[in-house]
Image: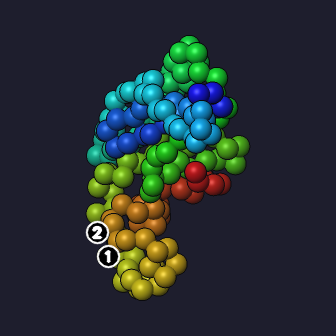
């Protein structure tokens, strides 16, 4: 079999993260095969500040760098990498593209009761028609509305979100 390429994928879950190298091979009969090897695993525990839970993004950045380093030191020749994470959470960026603060963790209670409030204002059907999402209290729309209701300085200073 001959080796064609290697990619590095990061999976950042709610409580742990991992870095996995995927190598694509072509077998002697020409069929493709994929070998996946975990090169790094780490804890991903939210940080509590006051009453709120946040993602520890600076630590996650260090873990991603460590995962890249381990893959390279392991002899893998990486063509690309990707990150799979946070379906609903986000970071707010200022006009210079800098992160304004640690993002809320989706398990933070700041959205308690907000989904019902937004549904009453916009209607359940309209929300589903625009988003297609199932109704979960921690979806991005409810997080943004909770920050708006709280008159969040971060939300006022934000130019974009990621």
Judging depth in this view, the residue of 95 and 25 nearest the camera is 25
Q: Can residue 73 be seen from the camera position used here?
A: yes
Dividing the picture into quadrants, the one containing residue 99 is top right
Residue 32 as seen in the image, left or right of residue 138: right
The residues tagged by marks 2 and 1 sit, at their Cα atoms, a distance apart of 6 Å
Q: In the figure, residue 125 lies in which quadrant?
A: bottom left
Q: Residue at x 43, y 71 (%)?
A: 133
Q: Residue 53 vs residue 56: left or right?
A: left
**Residue 62 visible to the viewer:** no
Return the x and y of residue 6 as percentages of the image width and height: 60, 30
Residue with the most extreme front position: 29
Foreground pick, 11 / 100: 11
Residue located 58% across and 42% down the image: 31
In the image, 92 versus 29, the foreground residue is 29
Give the camera-side residue of 82 and 27.
27
User: For the point 35% across and 71% down, which residue is it?
Assistant: 135
Q: Where is the N terminus found, in terms of image quarters? A: top right
Relative vertical location of residue 123 with respect to residue 14 in this rendering, above or below: below
Looking at the rendered structure, which numbered label has been put on residue 23? none
Residue count near mark 1 (Cα–Cα under 10 Å), binned few <14, some 14–19, many ≥20:
some
The residue labelled by disc 2 is 113
Task: Identify the element where label 1 is drawn.
Answer: helix
* x and y, in percent, of residue 71 in the image: 54, 21
User: Circles 2 and 1: CB distance less than 8 Å?
Assistant: yes
In the image, is residue 51 above or below residue 80? Answer: below
- Identified at 33% across, 66% down, the residue is 136
Q: Position of residue 13 (x, y in %)?
A: 38, 42
Q: Residues within 10 Å of mark 2 (few under 14, many from 20)?
A: few
Instruction: Give the residue at mark 1.
Output: 116
Residue 21 horizontal/vertical position (percent): 51, 30
State the SS at label 2: loop
């Amino acid at each position: 079999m001959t080796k064609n390429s290697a990619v590095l994928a990061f999976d950042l879950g709610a409580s742990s993260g991992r870095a996995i190298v995927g190598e694509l091979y072509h077998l002697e009969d020409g069929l493709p095969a994929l070998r996946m090897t975990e090169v790094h695993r780490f804890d991903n525990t939210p940080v509590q500040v006051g009453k709120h839970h946040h993602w520890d993004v600076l630590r996650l950045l260090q873990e991603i760098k460590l995962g890249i380093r381990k893959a390279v030191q392991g002899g893998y020749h990486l063509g690309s990498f990707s990150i799979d994470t946070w379906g609903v959470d986000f970071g707010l960026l200022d006009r210079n593209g800098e992160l304004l603060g640690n993002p809320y963790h989706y398990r933070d209670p700041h959205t308690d009761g907000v989904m019902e409030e937004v549904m009453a204002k916009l209607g359940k059907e309209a929300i589903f028609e625009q988003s297609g999402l199932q109704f979960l209290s921690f979806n991005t729309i409810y997080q943004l509305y909770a920050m708006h209701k709280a008159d969040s300085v971060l939300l006022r200073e934000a130019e974009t979100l990621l």
